């Protein structure tokens, strides 16, 4: 039996054992969590990725998710929402004096946003390079912005720019109970644990 099948079989077995058992509402023991918390440091780094209103309108959500899944990151938070001016004012606080700030808020409130939290080794830096330069004219082909956008005012996706910013942005966009801690079956294939 291959590794993934063993993983699935183990989950099914755990599910069956818990049926009829008053303990069943308790989450299963974090077997794999123990494994990777003792392995490569930084595996649980997280970042905020958001598909902006132009990306949602253009049905690019699936493509963005696919890239992050294919790269090997783990999705731990996901929601579609109409962002309020309040959350955006906090999110873009550092840009409040820029000439494009009001237009940026108008753009970001023009339709729904898909906010996500992705987890994995070096995810902040790697996702910035997957997303590409802020100005799509400078973004390389193969990056999200380099493949799907042409103008800086409509650049499809947001990615946190540092680990500290990511922590702040994740707690701004997600409540604690909206983040799901789960164990990825392929972790010991992806990483040297
Ligand atoms: P980033 O999204 O690559 O981190 P920031 O400099 O943090 O880039 O800018 C935040 C967002 O503000 C950009 O993604 C883009 O949507 C918008 N923006 C930045 N510069 C300009 C500009 O010169 N004109 C219009 N919008 C801009
Ligand atoms: Mg930024």
Image: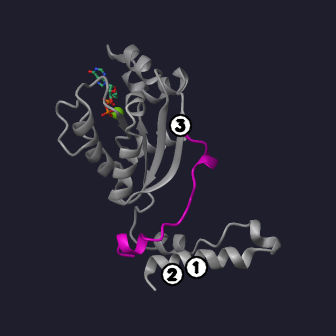
Tell me the residue that label 2 is attached to: 6
Instruction: Please identify the quarter of the rendering in which residue 86 is found.
Output: top right
Magenta stretch encompasses residue 55: no
Q: Position of residue 89 (x, y in %)?
A: 48, 23
Residue in the foreground of this view, choosing between 177 and 40: 177
- Let me know if residue 178 is in the magenta part: yes
Compared across the picture, whether 130 is left or right of 9 comes to: left
- State which region is magenta: 173-193
Mark 3 or mark 1, which has the lower sequence index?
1
Q: Cα distance, mark 1 to mark 2? A: 6 Å
Q: What element carries label 3?
A: strand
> Horizontal and vertical percent for residue 58?
37, 32
Q: Which residue is drawn at 37% across and 36% down?
A: 158
Coloured how?
one colour
Return the residue at label 1: 10
Q: Is mark 2 on a helix, strand or loop?
A: helix
Cα–Cα span, label 3 and label 2: 34 Å
Q: Classify 10 Å Cα crowding around label 3: few (below 14), some (14-19), many (20 and above).
A: few
Pointer 3: what residue?
80
């Amino acid at each position: 039996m291959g590794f993934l099948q063993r993983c699935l079989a183990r989950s099914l077995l755990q599910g069956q054992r818990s049926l009829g058992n008053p303990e069943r509402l308790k989450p299963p023991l974090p077997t794999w969590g123990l494994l990777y918390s003792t392995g490569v440091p930084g595996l649980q780094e997280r970042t905020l990725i958001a598909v902006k209103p132009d990306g949602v309108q253009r049905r690019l959500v699936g493509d963005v998710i696919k890239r992050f899944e294919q790269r090997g990151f783990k999705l731990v938070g996901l929601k579609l929402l109409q962002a309020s001016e309040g959350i955006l004012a906090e999110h873009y606080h550092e840009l409040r004096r820029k000439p494009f700030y009001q237009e940026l808020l108008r753009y970001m409130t023009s339709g729904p946003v898909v906010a996500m939290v992705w987890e994995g080794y070096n995810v902040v830096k790697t996702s910035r390079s997957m997303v590409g330069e802020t100005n799509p004219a400078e973004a390389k082909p193969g990056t999200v912005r380099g493949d799907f956008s042409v103008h800086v005012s409509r650049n499809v996706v947001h990615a946190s720019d540092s680990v500290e910013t990511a922590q702040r942005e994740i707690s701004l966009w997600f409540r604690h109970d909206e983040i799901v801690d789960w164990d990825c079956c392929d972790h010991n294939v992806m990483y040297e644990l």
